[in-house]
Amino acid sequence: MAEPTPFKISVSDDLLSFITDRVSTARIPPGIDLSASEAWSHGAPESVMSQLQQYWAKKYDWRAVEARINSHLKMFTLPIDHEGETLTMHFVHHRSSREGAIPLLFQHGWPGNFLEVEKIIDELVEPKEKGKQAYHVVAPSLPGFVFSEMSKRAEYGLSDMAHMIHKLMTALGYETYMGQGGDWGSLIVRTIGSLYPNHCVAVHVNMVVSGPPSWKSPLTLIRFIGWAIWQDKSKEGSLLGRMMWWQKDEQGYLEIQGTKPQTLAYALVDSPLGMLAWIRDKVEHLVDDDFTWEEEEIITWAM
């Protein structure tokens, strides 16, 4: 197998000019009157997107962001073969100097990307606290995300990504490793753990997906039905309520992305502000309530 190739981000001036022009000339559709508590109920508010457009057009400095990422993160690419297809994978790879460091696969999901690891990678690799566990961190970009090549196979799915990412880890010399995943990354690392239990020896996820209660567990099913009818006010009932709200009001993006991704791509690829709105809307409810998205960070995600 080929050796990893060092990688630096280098967006062309032509592409950067295209993006800047599209952002500056984008038209913001008029919003509707909503209460503060309902401000996001119809999607990203006009006021939020107008502010982001102004920041992006007048203050955002991609070249400074690009330089920061290139100087901080050690990035590489490596071609990975799977099912008769070779895709070039982009990934961050930081090795610890500490004895006993554990290989850690850090897998993003959607609408995230490899930059999710940027704020914590230094502490994971070289902890400030003496005696704290250190890690060799590998943070791949999923196929089709950012700088990783996209598969052309329509049936390409979770297991394919799991196989490819495991092959990446072993190509880097990690025969055993741990996995951390969020969103799609959680499903992928769980799949890796299932397919390669002797290699991916531990899995941590920050999104847990489970199916509805089955007939094999009648008491659980009765409790679920009871909650749906009488709206259980306990902590568990509150969490179930949020789950039902998410499925009813917040999963529209999943349906269109899962059924007609090519159609959606024409709109988002040609409109940077449209891409930003699509991402900004979802991350509003995917983080803790006390987290504030800085303009530069969320625009960088849309880039």
Image (tube, grey):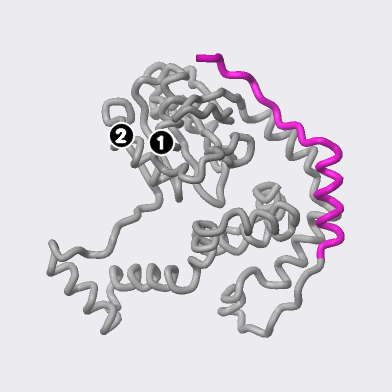
Which sits in the foreground, 288 or 158? 158
- The span picked out in magenta is 1-26
- Does dot 2 land on a helix, a strand or a loop? helix
Please check the rendered image and state whether residue 10 is part of the magenta-colored stretch, yes or no.
Answer: yes
What is the spatial separation of the Cα atoms under label 1 and label 2, in whole angstroms? 8 Å
Judged left or right of residue 71, residue 283 is left
User: Does the image show residue 134?
Assistant: no
Q: Residue at x 28, y 79 (%)?
A: 228
Please check the rendered image and state whether residue 50 is part of the magenta-colored stretch, yes or no.
Answer: no
Q: Amino acid at mark 2?
A: Leu
Judged left or right of residue 273, residue 112 is left
Judged left or right of residue 222, residue 116 is right
Q: Which residue is mark 1?
A: 162
Residue 51 pos. (x, y %) = 76, 65
- Does dot 1 land on a helix, a strand or a loop? helix
Above or below: residue 104 compared with residue 189: above
